[in-house]
Amino acid sequence: MTDKAHLGSPLPSLDRRFLVFLGPLVLTNILQALTGTVNHIYVGRLLGAGSLAAVASFMPLFLLLSAFIFGLGNGASILVGQAFGARNHARLHAVAGTTLCAGVLLGLVLAALGLLAVRPLMLLLGTPADVLPQAVAYARGMMVLFPVLFTSMLVAALLRGTGDTVTPLRALVVSLSVTLVCAPLFIRGVPALGLPALGILGGVAALLLATLCSLGYTAWHLRRRAHVLAPTRALAAHLRLDAALLRTLVRLGVPTGLFFITGSLADLGLLSLVNAHGSAATAAWGAASQVMSYVLFPAMAVAIASSVFAAQAIGAGHGQQLAAVTRTGMRMNLLLTGGLALLMFGAAPWVVGLFVADARVIDIAARVLPITVWGAVFFGWASVYSGVMRASGTVLAPTLISLGCLACLIVPLGWLLGRQFGLVATWVAYPATYLCALVLQGLYFHGVWRRQALQRLV
């Protein structure tokens, strides 16, 4: 969908619109995960399982520190979708300007605070002593990148609000290409060219260069297309914090941010349980998490699509489309996320073997994946419900349901199951928790929200 499209004009079926939107978005998410995966593969293969465990130890902390950016991006895509549906480009620019300014400021603050507290945090998590120095160095390097990484993430979220999922896909192709070429060179060094071996920080340096290149490409491409979000004087005039818009962004984005924070804290809690089994278990956690991201991202993409289409329908005054948007989102999640989950059963050992050659790590991760993949399917369905409700302005109840399940179930279940049935059973907490969230979101959506909010919108 381009910036000239509008919901008042003749449109193809929702299935087709979802597929046109989801195709590039799913590929973007896969490439985004692949960029991180390439770094993990290079680190694991070139530096060993210990270095892979060090990188894996930081990932839940990264998700925790960047949680509000995910929320800010979600809120921005909803507001952009509403403005785009109403053809209000002035408000669209205002949303974009406030979002980008807030993201850069938050990145700077988190980078400064994180650098000071990273070692105590890694110790608190019980990071194995043999990988602690590498884990701390990697975490500090990644935190320095927060302002640049956050900007890239928010630009993609803003573009999705206009229905443009192709530009972020092309930007990720640029990013992945740079990572593929530069990561091994930075990790091992090229003495002939005077490039020193950076070790575990080589992946960080490659990520920085890749992100800058992708942002440069995005700016050039948007200007060439005369896109509504191209970096022009009209957009630059709105690069400031608008207090009223920021409050709205916070109201819409904080629940998503809290969801990611709670989920990250739950991950950290489970990781601390896994860390007690040694660095092999930690490395298996990292490998399994990377593979799981490929299953989770389609689920997240479907939820994003549902939220964007719901916001555009609301902005255009077509509230009657929300029920159809919800049904289509549920169906797409079954096809995409469910289909990918099935593939993991047979491919899990081979996929995990890409990350590390250690037989024990491969064995643990390959047994974990067939358990956890179903959590992604349940997560996707629950997120379609909550995404449509948030697009309409209903925030509190979906947030409380999600946060309650994550806060109260994952770690206790992981501890109990791991204690009774062993290490691998710890991961059963994921599908069990997301299934509970799905049931509760569905009950609220069909029993309360549709009867009240949907009638008001129509």
Image (spheres, grey):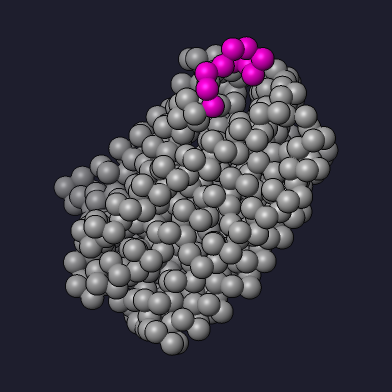
Name of the residue lying farthest toward the left: 192
| Extent of the magenta region | 5-14
Location of residue 378 in the rendering, given as x and y in whole percent from the top left corner:
51, 56
Which residue corresponds to the image point at 53% horizontal and 77% vertical from the top-left?
A: 413
- Tell me if residue 444 is in the magenta stretch: no
Quadrant of the snapshot with the C terminus: top right
Quadrant of the rendered structure where residue 291 is?
A: bottom left
Taking the spot 71% from the left edge, 53% from the top edge, the residue there is: 444
In the shown orientation, is residue 111 left or right of residue 54? right
For residue 220, say whether it is visible: no
Residue located 81% across and 43% down the image: 452
In percent of the image, x 23 and y 62: which residue is there?
A: 349
Q: Position of residue 276 (x, y in %)?
A: 41, 84
Q: Position of residue 151 (x, y in %)?
A: 56, 40
Can residue 26 be seen here? The reply is: yes
Question: Which secondary structure dominates the residues rendered in magenta?
Answer: loop
- Residue found at the very far bottom of the displayed protein: 420
